[in-house]
Amino acid sequence: MSRLIQITIPSEAAGKRLSVYLAEAGYPLTADCGGRGTCGKCRVTVLSGSFAADPNGTTAVMPNSEGQILACHAWCGHQQAVILLPVSEGQGLTIDTTGSTVVDISSCGVALDIGTTTLAAALVSLESGAILRTVSRLNPQKSFGADVMSRIGAVMANESNLPIMQTLLLDAVRLMIYELTNGKAVSRMTVAGNPTMLHLFCGISPVGMGAYPFTPAFTHAKTLTGAELDLPVGTVTLLPSISAFIGGDITAGMLAQEITDHDEPVLLVDMGTNGEMILYTGQNHGSKLYGTSTAAGPALEGAGISTGVGGISGAVCGVKFNGLSTQTKTIDNQPPIGICGSGLIDLIAVLLQRGLIDETGYLEEDPFPYAEDLTLTGGDIRAFQLAKSALRAGMEVLCETAGISPHELSRIYIAGGLGYYMDINSAVAVGLLPDCPRQHMISVGNTSLTGATMALCDPSLIERAACDAALCEIVELNLSPSFNDKFMEYMMFPYGDD
Ligand code: FES
């Protein structure tokens, strides 16, 4: 649920961008546009005081008729100010301690998955491999944009954003470790994440990945001491990446699903903001590995959708039509506050089923009310089409490059939080997934964290991940002759006999 809190901005913040000050103070705002002033998601209400429209404080920001300003385009002044800002419950720490409560921390380690949107960590027994506790929280860097390109862009625009983003991330990770270990140090930690997140975690500039030829500063597995990062762990090992946009999160996923042990072709798709995917042809078909990534954008995580929210309490996560009426389901059965990725896929599938959207995505009733005070717009459908088409076209090009039809895949593993809630039939109905036998499509959850956990308990798996990464042929979608055609094709929704 969203609520408003009152924050006093002290005079010491003078000259700081308001969104940066709030992020550093522990109140990162959503900033889907990366601070370009176009998404409107960083709005705060000014109760007293004023803000400037530039760092020098020469012009004042004029609040709108509701007293709101954009925090990304406001600089703090020398006078104290008071603002109201929305925070969601999902912003806080979630802790699952359903496992053992009597824990010998000295025999434990921590596995961490750094997602662009969400951080997840687990306290793991190094002896048994059991996950004893998990915590998650939103990535506090979200105030620098919803996707990796916005985060890289923030460092390109101003180098001083790099240490700020690193500090935000490390502060959050330190808190998570503290929650997991009750303040005790552990011997080791493994970290999986996309290459941009891994660079920012280490404080290494990601700007080489911001433009062609998209060169990461490192892709190899990296081991640091906890002291170097001021974290209460002995050593910190980052899983290897494959390229600028195929990261340690997918090499961890390959470990989790033991991808290269399969005899027949398998596909692993991580449906995050950046859709990463790996195809293994199978031991019976040449044992080849292909990998690619596609900029799906954050629409499937609820961002960039007018009433979109993450997977938080009250998010519409399921929509069904029984031929007569439409039922919606929300997370925790709370009153609906917006729609998350799985709800969006379901809703669009239902609208297609009811003939309220045509194959081009044209929405007859725009905006369409799907819950009390909540609507879906034609623009939302367009954002969804772009995301699903990027993912689907990426899968198709990967299969084409490997010389395999999607129907020959013995497994399609769908990783990422979305997979847990996503209805596979709806995903097929909207064209996000190919129409393969349903028993071949399996939601496997956060394989990045699972792989990091496995590598924590068995460090030899880091070497295996590095070998897999070295063998993987990178498929550059922007160089693929068929990607554009497939992208246009999958912008359309399946219709009739498609
Ligand atoms: S308007 Fe998008 S972050 Fe401020």
Image: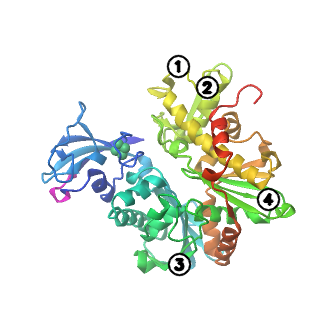
Q: Distance between the residues labelled 3 and 4?
A: 31 Å
Verify CB contact (< 8 Å) between mark 4 and mark 2: no
Whichever of callouts 1 and 3 sits on the residue coming sooner in the sequence is: 3
Q: In this view, does 147 lie to the left or right of 274?
A: left
Q: Residues within 10 Å of mark 4 (few under 14, many from 20)?
A: many
- The residue that disc 2 covers is 351
* Residues packed near mark 3 inside 10 Å, few (<14), some (14 to 19) or many (20 plus): some
Indicate the amino acid at tag 4. Answer: Thr
As drawn, the residue found furthest toward the left would be 79
Q: At label 1, which amino acid type do we have?
A: Glu
Which residue corresponds to mark 3?
223
Q: Give how far across and how far down residue 41 sits, in percent.
A: 37, 41
At mark 1, the secondary structure is: loop
* SS assignment at label 2: helix
Reply yes or no: does residue 193 show up in magenta: no
Q: Residue 255 carries which label?
A: none
**Spatial CA span between label 4 and label 2:** 36 Å
Q: Which amino acid does label 2 sit on?
A: Leu
Q: Which of marks 4 and 1 is in front?
A: 4
Q: Return the x and y of residue 305 as percentages of the image width and height.
A: 48, 37
Which stretch is magenta? Answer: 8-13
Q: Residue 318's x, y, as percent?
A: 60, 35
**Which label number is shown at residue 281?**
4
Task: Write down the residue under mark 1.
Answer: 365
